[in-house]
Image: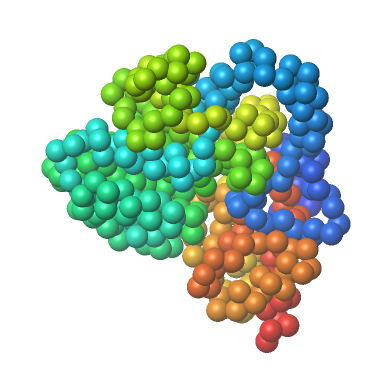
Amino acid sequence: MSTGAVARPTSAELDARDPLAAYRSRFVGADDPAVAAYLDGNSLGRPVAGVAERLTAFVEGAWGDRLIRSWDEAWMDEPTRVGDRLGRVVLGAAPGQVVVGDSTSVLLYKLLRAAAAARPDRREVVVDRDNFPTDRYLLEGVAAECGLTIRWVEADPDGGVTVDDLAPALGGGTAFVLLSHVAFRSGHVADGPALTRLVHDAGALVVWDLSHSAGSVEVALDAWGADLAVGCTYKYLNGGPGSPAFAYVRADLLPDLKQPLWGWMGHADPFAMGPAYEPAPGIRRLLTGTPPVLAMQPLQAMLDLLEEAGMPAVRVKAMALTEHAVALADERLAAYDVRLASPRDPAERGAHVMLEHPAFREVTARLWQQGVVPDFRPPAGLRIGLSPLSTSFAEVERGIDAVAAALAELG
C-alpha cells in the first residue's frame, strides 16, 4: 500500500464535483473564448444572464407604461424593499435595517458622521493603515471636520486586523472604529463577532465595510451585534459598474441616528414640502436624494441566484476556489519566486488571493491582451478574484498557467 501523499483532484474533477457548477452558464460571457480566465470578479462581477431583458421590461413597463405613477406604485419603497431582501439573503439582517442607494463613499461618509455624532464626548477614531484608501481618506476628512484624532492600527499586511492588533488602540476616548470584513489586499477575513465585542467593551461603535465580502462570504450582522455597515454591489453582487451601495444600521440605533446629508427622500413626509427637515422614523432617514431605481435592477437578478444557491454553499465554493488557486501557485509559480501575500488557511480568506512578484505589473498588462484578466495592485500584487457562482476551477488553472508562461517569457 502506498504511503505517499494523496494526489490533489484535477480542475476537471473539481468542476465535475461542484454542486454550483451549473450556475456558471447563468452569467453573460462565461463561456466566451475571447476571455480565457476572468479573475477579477472581486472588482466587477459578470452580468447575470437575463439582465438585458429585465432592463428592457423595466423601460417598457414600469417606466415607459406606468411613467410617474410607478413612484407611488413601487419605486418609493424600492430602496428599503431591496435592502430588506439583501439583508435577508446576504447580510444576516432583519427587515428595516438595510437601505440601497448612493455610492459606497457617500453612504460611508453618512455613517462615519453619524457614528461621530452618536459619541459626542469621545474624540478618537480608529482605523488600520492598510484599509481601503477611500475608507481611510473619508475617515481623515471626517476627523478634520469634527476635530477628531485618528488612532492607526498596524496589522500584518499579509493578514488583517485581529483582536490583539485592535485592543491597544481602544480606550475611553474611542468614538468608533472603521474595519473591513475582508481585507482588500490580502483577502483576510476579520473575526466579525470578536472584533465587534471588543469595540463594544470599550463603549464605542463599529462601522463595517463589507465591500469585499457581501455575496462571497457569510455575514451575520445581527448576530454579531454590529452597529453600522456599508458595502458596494458591483463586486460579488454583480450589480454592474456604478451600481448603488447599501447601508445597514442596527434597529435600536435608528431613532437617534443623525446623518449629515438631509434631503427630501429622507424626510418623514417627502411630499409635504415643509419648511423644516424632519427625519423619517426608520432606515429611510439615511436617504437623501432620488434613489437610483433603474440601477437597482441588475442587483436583484444576482440576489435571485444567491438566494437559490444559498450563502453557505457559496462560501464553501469560494474557499475551494482559493484553495485551488494557492495550490496551483505553489506548484507552478514557486520557481519564479512568487510569494503568497494572503492567509494560507482557506477559512481565513475571502474569495480572492494576493500573489506578489516584482514583474506583476508587466505580467498583468500581457495577460489582459491574452484574455486572462486578473487585477494588479501596487507595488507588486496580482490579485486573483474568484466569484463563486461564475468561476470554474478550470478557469483558475488557465489563469495560473498564463501567469507562469508570462513570467517565463520575461525571464
- Residue depicted at x 74% and y 38%: 48
**267 is higher (above) or lower (below) than 26:** above
Q: Is residue 307 left or right of residue 213?
A: right
Query: Where does residue 402 sit, x and y in percent of width and height?
Result: 73, 69
Q: Is residue 65 left or right of residue 75?
A: right
Q: Which residue ends up furthest to the front in the rendered image?
A: 275
- Residue depicted at x 61% and y 40%: 243
Q: Quadrant of residue 74?
A: top right
In the picture, which quadrant includes the N terminus?
Answer: bottom right
**286 is higher (above) or lower (below) than 233:** above
Query: Where does residue 319 sit, x and y in percent of width and height?
Result: 58, 47
- Residue depicted at x 83% and y 49%: 31
Q: Which residue ends up furthest to the right in the rendered image?
A: 33
User: Do we see residue 206 in this rendering?
Assistant: no
- Residue depicted at x 68% and y 87%: 411
Query: Where does residue 113 sit, x and y in percent of width and height?
Result: 32, 40
Q: Nearer the viewer, residue 271 or 301?
A: 271
Q: Nearer the viewer, residue 289 or 100?
A: 289
User: Do we see residue 31 in this rendering?
Assistant: yes
Query: Where does residue 159 sit, x and y in percent of width and height?
Result: 42, 58
**226 is higher (above) or lower (below) than 33:** above
Q: How was this image coloured?
A: rainbow
Q: Is residue 134 left or right of residue 120?
A: right
Q: Is residue 311 left or right of residue 347?
A: right
